[in-house]
Image (cartoon, rainbow, N blue to C red):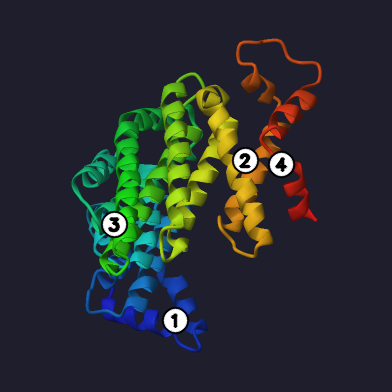
Amino acid sequence: DMNAAYVFEVLNSSLSSQPEPALKKLSELEYQDQFSVALYNIANDKSVQPHIILMASICLKNVIFKRWKVASRNQAALSDDEKLFLRQCLPHLLFNTDSKSAIHIALALGRIARFEFPQIWPQLIPSLIESVTNSQGQQKNRSLLGLFHVIAELSQKRLRQDRDTFTQVCNQIFDLLYGSWTFHIQEIIVISENIKNDKSNTQNYDLLFNACECVKLSLRILKRMCKLGFSREEGVEKVSRTIATAISAFKNFHSIQSQLVDITILEAVIYKHCAFISTICLIHFEACIPSFAEMLETFHSITCQGIQKVNDEIMFPSQRTMIRSILFYKNLLESTEFPRLLNPNNNKKPTDDSSISTITVSSYLSIPQLHSITE
């Protein structure tokens, strides 16, 4: 077996003021047997300093990306024993390392899933789903993190058989992920109310932060599934339900944000919901029809309020959320299918799409305010 103490010294040297020789040595070690096992043992050692654990996790991820499946016979793939060891042990490391290292372990799990799920590692997604269902706090956060990167990798595969597998997975886990997302949305609302009543209780902010992380991860998974897991015909009910909930959550988060001492806590959550609505709307037009009027009204409110706050030099909502709202209008107007949203029962295409679209959207949009920010 490769000497873990030697690998530790190389990792430590790679973080010194003169890292070049050590980094070159790490590149050489990447293609040696048992290097991945040595890296895992270092990353899993609680007595090791966090910066070395992070470096070991990054190197382990790189080895898996390069050697799990090689494109050339001149390169050596990981041995079957190493692959078996990593399949058995990586989930444990995901749940028992620091947050920065966990990101790289989750990326590594996703890459393994690309080649091993479902034929060789069929229990991967079910085990993560079980953890999402039965855990809470950091454990649930890590489960969602791992599941997101697995879903992200599977969603990128393009062969028909792989696409069918991904659609099947999406159908199997959608309701559970939707339930997790809505549960944490309500949790954020309740915790925010508790903070409003007792701003001195710092524990509430820790709970709020974790709930926000779970909401963001759940929504990122749902976005992948809605975007790539369902056809327009198959996903109407699921996407329609998710869009309606996203709009409601977006409005609720925006209204309670001002109640918090630190208004930036919800900023990323608000933006993620804004991005989800504006992206999925352009892919699943039919599913958005029931929520279309409320969607326009919501983005109009956010855009105008954001512009007013810019003029007052107070960035609330965040600048990127406001810009995303404005881009939503732009992309909607440019879409060739937009007139069908306005007239879903009329199959005839209007002779002048742009004029009809512009008149309708301008009823929600204050043009002078837009001019004030663009100038």
Q: Few, some or many C-alpha atoms within 10 Å of disc 1 (few <14, some 14-19, many ≥20)?
A: many
Q: In x, y percent, where is residue 123?
A: 24, 40
Image marks 4 and 3: residues in contact by CB distance under 8 Å: no
Q: Identify the disc placed on residue 300.
A: 2
Residue at screen point 41% across, 85% down:
13
Residue type highlighted by circle 3? Asn
Q: Could you classify mark 4 by the number of other residues whose Cα lies within 10 Å: few (under 14), some (14-19), or many (20 or more)?
A: some
SS under mark 3:
helix
**Which quadrant would the N terminus be assigned to in this image?**
bottom left
> Residue 318: x percent and y percent?
56, 57
Q: Which mark is residue 14?
A: 1
Is residue 79 at least partly visible in the picture? no
Q: CA distance from mark 1 to mark 3?
A: 47 Å
The image quarter in which residue 56 lies: bottom left
Question: Residue at image x 66%, y 45%?
Answer: 326
Q: In whole angstroms, how far apart are the C-alphas of marks 4 and 2?
A: 8 Å
User: Which residue type does callout 2 highlight?
Assistant: His
Left or right for 361, reference 79: right
Q: Secondary structure at mark 1?
A: helix
Vertical side of 375 occupied by 15: above or below:
below
Circle 3 sits on which residue?
194
Q: Position of residue 53 (x, y in %)?
A: 33, 73
Can you name the residue that lies furthest to the left here?
Answer: 134
> Residue 239 appears in which quarter of the rendering?
top left
Q: CA distance from mark 2 to mark 1?
A: 51 Å
Q: Amino acid at mark 4?
A: Ser
Mark 2 and 3 residues: CB-CB less than 8 Å, in contact? no
Comparing 247 with 120, the one in front is 247
Question: Earlier along the polypeptide chain: callout 4 or callout 3?
Answer: 3
The type of residue carrying mark 1 is Ser
Callout 2 touching callout 1 (CB < 8 Å): no
